Amino acid sequence: MNNRLTVLAGPTAVGKGTISTYIRQNHPEVWFSVSATTRPRRPGEIDGVHYHFLTDDAFDALIAEGRLLEYAVVHGRHRYGTPAAPVEEKLEQGIPALLEIDLQGARQVKEKMPDARFVFLAPPTWEELVSRLTGRGTESEEEQERRLATAKRELAAESEFDVIIVNDHVRTAAEELLSLMGISTSD
Ligand code: 5GP
């Protein structure tokens, strides 16, 4: 059986999180990789569920031991990375696996696993992306500026991807992604 890893990337605040939430709630058969990060936990986030929250030293150790499939500094600040073993395990078991990572990480996965399916989630318009980014209200102004700069650079990378999904509507975009993964969305 040909179980391909699916990598979902796209600019910050494009709505990767809402697509993931929709899929988590409606398609528990999809496995989501839990990333390691050095970013502090936000209220409501659970260690081991949303992320593995690590110290810099613990993150360094994962890199040194070669246990990350990819890792990157995102928004010029904290490190995020995908533990390799769980991904390999799920693929071997034939379980549909999804990585929701940044562009730099997606490029590293492409080097290591060129057969993976690379999906770019695009905003309907740049204005929509800006309004989503500033409307979230969880980051400082300085942090928002930093994220906008990252988003601008990331938007230019569409062409590197196999498929582009425009996030006009959460359910439609999520179902498009699921259908690419070979998962039936009719009840
Ligand atoms: P946040 O801090 O808002 O949870 O995530 C910030 C960004 O980090 C998101 O754009 C997300 O895609 C990216 N990210 C999350 N996990 C990983 C990972 O394991 N590797 C990489 N390269 N990026 C990640």
Image (cartoon, rainbow, N blue to C red):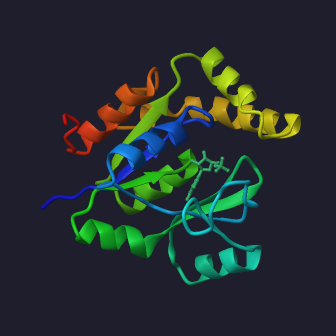
**Quadrant of the image occupied by residue 162:** top left
Looking at the picture, tell me which residue is in the foreground, 27 or 108.
27
Q: Quadrant of the C terminus?
A: top left
The residue located at (68%, 61%) in the rendering is 79
Q: Residue furthest toward the left?
A: 1
Front-lying residue, 52 or 49? 49
Q: Residue at x 16, y 58 (%)?
A: 2
Q: Is residue 84 left or right of residue 149?
A: left
Q: How many marks?
A: 0
**The quadrant where residue 45 appears:** bottom right
Q: Is residue 56 above or below residue 146?
A: below
- Residue at the (46%, 26%) spot, across then down: 167
Location of the N terminus by quadrant is bottom left
Q: Is residue 54 above or below residue 34?
A: below
**What residue do we see at 22% from left, 58% from top?**
3
Residue 97 placed where, x, y %?
34, 57
Report whether 78 appears left or right of 182. Answer: right
Q: Which of 126 and 15 lies nearest the eye of the viewer?
A: 15
Residue 9: percent from left, percent from top: 49, 42
Query: Residue 140: x percent and y percent?
Result: 86, 39
Report x, y in % for residue 51: 59, 62
